[in-house]
Amino acid sequence: MCYDLNDAFLSLGFEVYSEDDISSEKFAFDNLNFAPDHPARASMDTFWLDGTEEKRGNERLCLRPHLTGGSVRYLLKHGAPARFVYPGRVYRNETTDARHERAFFQYEALIVDHDISFASGKVMIQTILEKVFGRKINVRMREGFFPFTEPGYEIDMECLVCGGKGCRVCNHNGWIEVMPGGVIHPNVLRAANLDPEEWTGFYINIGLDRLVMMRYGVDDVRLFHSADLRFLQQFR
């Protein structure tokens, strides 16, 4: 699946980017416009490394809770305009269920340029899903809040496990959230030393495990990490 996405984005002129699994508070939260008291910073949500919990900024280290912090690191190094994708594993201290794991894969894409429109972002979403699944996918976008976007959206696709009829994967409503997205927040551009009066951008952050679930009809994300040979042998 990751290779399929790489091929799709490379065909659209994107670069593939990667970095280490260990991040810092500065890149995971500070640069992304998270408030100092945001609950995601707490140990109940983020895995902080021993010995750094009481530190701040670059010295407070964690297993990256999302890939979005890498966007500022990339832009600081390469500047704008930019279009890149960033696949990798992320880590969250949360309760597991059929749709959630503590370690899972994301696939982020970001465009930064002059006058990037909302329509451009939506076309990118639909194009990528069609390339991955080989057909048109029903998509809906709901207003959502993320500190690093303004405005932000929850992006759902019709559940392919049940065909939109409702099952435990989609919480019995026929839709499953596969990515947040939105227009990059001006404060994130400033953290990357870019002028928000000159530049704008659009994020999407794909839940890669959920796309695999949709593609192969898997109804429990925990199976990917179960080491159950009966399950794994299907993909040899």
Image (cartoon, grey):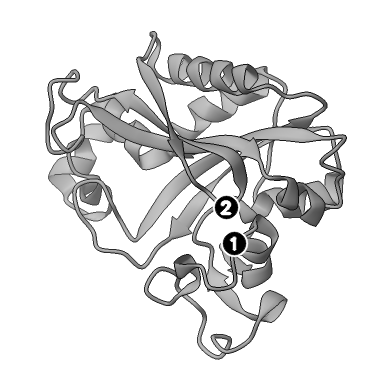
Answer above or below: position of 11 versus 73: above
Q: Nearer the viewer, residue 66 or 186?
A: 186
Q: Residue at x 56, y 40 (%)?
A: 108
Query: Which amino acid, mark 2?
Result: Pro
Q: Residues within 10 Å of mark 1 (few under 14, many from 20)?
A: some
- Mark 2 and mark 1: span between their CA atoms? 6 Å
Please tell me which residue lies in front, 45 or 209: 45
Residue 2 falls left or right of residue 109: left
Indicate the position of residue 159 as horizontal and vertical percent values: 24, 25
Q: Earlier in the sequence, mark 2 or mark 1?
A: 1
Q: Residue at x 17, y 42 (%)?
A: 231
Please say if 208 is above or below 22: above
- Classify mark 2: residues with Cα within 10 Å, few (<14), some (14-19) or many (20+): some
- Residue annotated with mark 2: 147
> Dots 2 and 1: beta carbons under 8 Å?
yes
Q: Secondary structure at mark 2?
A: loop
Residue positioned 60% across, 23% down in the render: 121
Q: Quadrant of the C terminus?
A: top left
Kind of residue at badge 1: Phe
> In which quarter of the view is residue 119 placed?
top right
- x and y percent of residue 180 in the render? 47, 39
Residue 205 visible in this rendered orientation of the protein: no
> Mark 1 = which residue?
34
